[in-house]
Amino acid sequence: MARELSGVGWVDRFPTSRSTDTLVDGFREKCEAFLAALEDAGAIVTINATLRPPERAYLMHWSFVINTGEVEPDDVPEHAGVEIDWVHRKSNGSPDLPVSLAAAAAMVHGYGIAHRPSLTSLHIFGKAIDMSVEWTSGLKIKRKNGTKKTIGSLPRTGLNHELWAVGATYGVLKLASDAPHWSSTGH
């Protein structure tokens, strides 16, 4: 079977879910309870990613490491169900590294990748959610036990450490190094 050359055309394939319905049992209920508390408190939440197919994780990871120069396009392993050719060629059949790198860069840009994507991300297993959270003034939010916490500190986003503590009461843990990422383990 002929492989299709890498490039931005791959970005829309194997889409990531943005629904909590695709999270695994247990973590889904924790997320939905935390999201309900955020909504009740008046926070604005946008879910960017929940379940990510392993094929998408493969495409995101390898386009990123090709783009950064960590791996040559012809050294990328194959992945079942993803008939991609990372090596673009000149008319004489020899590898065209600049075009291959440009295609990987276009994919990274198309995915909007900010951090090196993992091949074993908790998104693949339905145990992570990427979301932006914002509010305009003091946030009065319920912890899991029903007590309210007023968050008056800055920033008024998902990067607020007091909000992380509230999320933890629900079992939704923040990964400090990745702005939108929350998960079952904090990784």
Image (cartoon, helix red, strand yellow):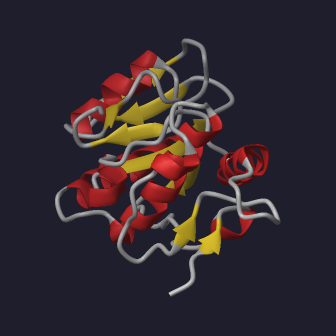
Q: Position of residue 31 (x, y in %)?
A: 33, 52
- Left or right of 40 on screen, residue 20: left
- Left or right of 165 on screen, residue 131: right
**What residue is at 36 percent from the left and 53 percent from the top?**
123
The residue lying toward the viewer, choosing from 52 and 117, is 117
Q: Which residue sits furthest front? A: 92
- Left or right of 68 on screen, residue 175: left
- Left or right of 102 on screen, residue 143: left
Say if residue 160 shows up in the picture.
Answer: yes
Q: Which residue sits furthest bottom? A: 1
Q: Position of residue 18 (x, y in %)?
A: 51, 64
Q: Position of residue 115 (x, y in %)?
A: 54, 33
Residue 25 appears in which quarter of the rendering? bottom left
Does residue 157 sit above or below 63 in this rendering?
above
Does residue 45 sit above or below 19 in this rendering?
above
The residue lying toward the viewer, choosing from 123 and 134, is 123
Say if residue 42 shows up in the picture.
Answer: no
The residue lying toward the viewer, choosing from 182 and 90, is 90
Q: Which residue sits furthest right? A: 91
**What residue is at 25 percent from the left and 51 percent from the top?**
30
Does residue 172 sit above or below 33 in this rendering?
above
- Tally of numbered tags: 0
Q: Position of residue 173 (x, y in %)?
A: 30, 34
- Which corner quadrant holds the C terminus? top left
The residue lying toward the viewer, choosing from 81 and 123, is 81
**What residue is at 44 percent from the left and 56 percent from the top?**
58
**What residue is at 35 percent from the left and 48 percent from the top?**
119
Does residue 45 sit above or below 90 in this rendering?
above
